Image: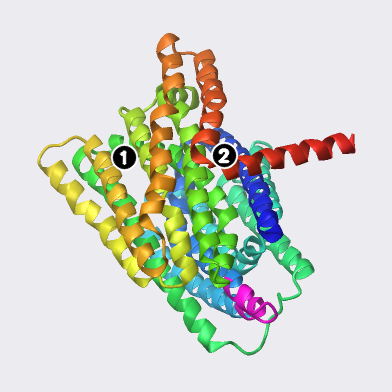
Amino acid sequence: MSNYHDSNKRIAKNTAFLYVRMLFVLLVNLYVSRVLLDALGVTDYGIYVVVTGFVTLFGFINATLASTMQRYYNYTGTQDAVNGIRNVYSTGCYIHVLIALVALLLMETVGLWYMYRFIVIPAERFEAGLFLFQTSALTLVLIILQIPFMGLVIAKERLGFFALVSIIDVVLKLAAALSLEVLPYDSVKTYGLLLLCISILNLTLYVAYVKYNFAQAHLSRQINRDLLRALMSFAGWNLVGTFAFMLKGQGVSLLLNNFFGPLVNAARGIAMQVSSAINGFSNNITVAFTPQIVNSVAAGDDDRARSMMYNESRICFGLILLIMIPLSLEIDYILRLWLGINVPDKTGIFSILMLADTTLCTLNTPCTQITQATGRIRKYQIAATCVNLALIPVCYVFLKIGMSAVSSFIITIIFSAVNQVVCLYNTNRVFRLNIPCYLRSVVRPCLICLVLLPVLPALVRVSLSPSIGRLVTTTVIDILAGLPLIYLILFNRKQRQTIRNYIADKLKERRIGI
């Protein structure tokens, strides 16, 4: 029981670390976008976006590889505390060196071919774009090499360091953007080179921290072939799901471009930025829970794993809903405040619908986590892939018969709900989920919060005129009314008592310290 209490305290502390980290990173990144646009100008900023965006397509495997490494660190570390992590670390390092080399080869062949043939860059700026491409390719290689070290940091729940490196990273990127105004060199080339230097620093920090803090981080000349096959199989099926999810988003964008042109794509692109920012908060909360869920499954403690999945689902949904409500109510004012008067038509409604989809999808991540913890992910990923890819032809049919662009966003929400049902079914096949208990413990309280939380902020909105004062008031009321409702609705009596005891202990420690 003491171990469980300590683990829960660690989750709470790590969630707080990551929540603060995400808020800071989000605000700085928004400011960096404006600084870069001013420093580079419209043309060079466009070159930066298109070149680095293309390189990012090659890096979509990073999240998949990181989750694979973290899962095996926790699972094998629980089952074999002496050699488990050492074997995963050593095998993982060799795998990621190979992946980095393959990625670099693809970038220098397929990537360069695409640069010369398809990316439209003014002739006088092509050299700068090519230099940026090369620095971005090397940055991608460094990110891949960083994954075994970052995965071990997350698996060991050293999320304070993880948050610190993220904050250092974004601060240095801000400093790099600000320096472009005073450095007497080509801005595009300079910024690409500075980003490469920041990636070198990030890798160095992770390597030094892992080597100093974890004795198991030791390379072996021999590769465990069984573990190698397991890692590659697990990563492969994860990759299928990630690739399908990426194709779903890109497919809808292409359909909208085909039927409505680039203006609708611009509106969707801005909406995706808003949605991605909120999704980042959700991902940070799930990072705090993942190691403990995997450890519990590996130790055979299904009851604790199930309880943590329920808790994560409720907490994640409640906190994201708390952010989504004022954003949705004040989206038009926020967009004007952020982008000025040049907000593309329908950006507001697109953003609201994508926020709704993001909030619904927070319930899917815990299902994925607990399924991945079991290692039996093949059928789960195949089913989720089929649902995600089926979205594209359905959207096409509705657009073809004359429905508006909004229909694609509504259909996406419906498919997310279908995907949640499919994922619950497949999770229950590999792990005793207890569906009736899930509906009572997770779905019912989340629906109650969804109905009650927006009431007071909505009343404030209709009572005041659009202004910064209304935005602040709506947000404050949302937090002051929402947190007590989340506390009362999403937590049971035992959990509320645990929260009260934790707060009382912290206040007592502070009084003793004083």
Whether residue 81 appears in magenta in the rendering, the answer is yes
Name the residue located 57 percent from the left edge and 66 percent from the top edge. Answer: 296
Alpha carbon separation for disc pair 1 and 2: 23 Å
Task: Identify the secondary structure beneath mark 1.
Answer: helix
Q: Residue at x 37, y 34 (%)?
A: 351
Q: Sort mark 2 into few (<14), some (14-19) or many (20+) by Cα contacts within 10 Å.
A: some
- Left or right: where does residue 406 sit relative to residue 428? left
Q: Which residues are magenta?
A: 75-89
Which residue, as the protein is rendered here, is positioned at the far left?
A: 401
Residue ID at (67%, 82%): 83
Amino acid carrying mark 1 in the image:
Asn
**Secondary element type, mark 2:** helix
**Which of marks 2 and 1 precedes in the sequence?**
2
Q: Nearer the viewer, residue 333 or 314?
A: 314
Quarter of the picture holding the C terminus = top right
Residue 117 is left or right of residue 203, and the answer is left
Place of residue 53 in the rendered image (x, y in percent of width and height, measured from the top left)? 45, 52
| Residue kind at label 2, given as amino acid type | Leu
Q: Which residue is mark 2?
A: 26
